[in-house]
């Protein structure tokens, strides 16, 4: 366990904040992948369809920008908002632009290496706060959003 002074909900006394987080993150990832593909398909005509030859690079670039922008604006991607989860820093505050960039960079690096992605998934499934590898490194957490009244 990391030696943080957490100000996020305690997983023992407030487990509802961490309930179903791994499953919700998976659903959010699928939604975000579909959204990213959609953006790429919208961009293709603007490249004179030459983007088809570099589609993997286009997908990675668009996906990176999408994640940074959406996470910086609301501490969650559109997929995460759909599943009612959001990121928080260890002090309980939502992400700002720099934390959104760092988290997306960590996510991208872990997606590039199968071993890192497997470690991240295992950590999400086995830790009290359902944190992935990038979350552990940055001291962040994904939690269920509070119901807004």
Image (cartoon, rainbow, N blue to C red):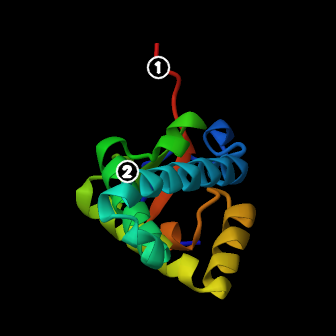
Tell me which corner region of the image, top left, top right, bottom left or bottom right, holds residue 124: bottom right
**Residue 58 against residue 69 in the figure, above or below:** below
**Residue 57 against residue 47 in the figure, above or below:** below
Q: Which residue is mark 1?
A: 148
Residue 71: mark: 2
Pick the residue in front: 9 or 32: 32
Pick the residue in front: 119 or 92: 119
Q: Which residue of the protein is positioned furthest toward the left in this rendering?
A: 97
Residue at 57% over, 47% down = 10
Where is residue 36 drawn, in percent x and y? Answer: 48, 55
Residue 111 seen in render: yes
- Secondary element at image label 1: loop
Residue at 47% over, 19% down = 148
Mark 2 or mark 1: name the one nearer the start of the chain.
Answer: 2
Quadrant assignment for the N terminus:
bottom right
Pick the residue in front: 52 or 105: 52
Q: Residues within 10 Å of mark 1 (few under 14, many from 20)?
A: few
**Residue 49 against residue 28 in the figure, above or below:** below
- Secondary element at image label 2: helix
Where is residue 121 drawn, in percent x and y? Answer: 69, 69
Where is residue 127 drawn, in percent x and y? Answer: 68, 64
Q: Residues within 10 Å of mark 2 (few under 14, many from 20)?
A: many
């Amino acid at each position: 366990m990391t030696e943080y002074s957490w100000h996020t909900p305690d997983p023992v006394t407030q487990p509802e904040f961490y309930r179903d987080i791994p499953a919700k993150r998976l659903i959010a990832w699928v939604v975000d992948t579909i959204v990213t593909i959609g953006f790429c398909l919208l961009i293709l005509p603007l490249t004179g369809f030459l983007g088809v030859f570099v589609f993997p690079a286009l997908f990675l670039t668009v996906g990176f920008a999408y994640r940074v922008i959406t996470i910086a604006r609301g501490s969650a991607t559109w997929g995460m908002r759909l599943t009612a989860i959001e990121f928080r820093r260890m002090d309980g505050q939502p992400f700002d632009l720099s934390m959104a960039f760092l988290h997306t960079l960590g996510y991208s690096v872990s997606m590039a290496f199968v071993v890192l992605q497997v470690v991240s998934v295992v950590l999400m499934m086995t830790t009290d706060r359902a944190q992935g590898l990038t979350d552990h490194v940055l001291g962040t957490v994904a939690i269920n959003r509070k119901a807004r009244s």
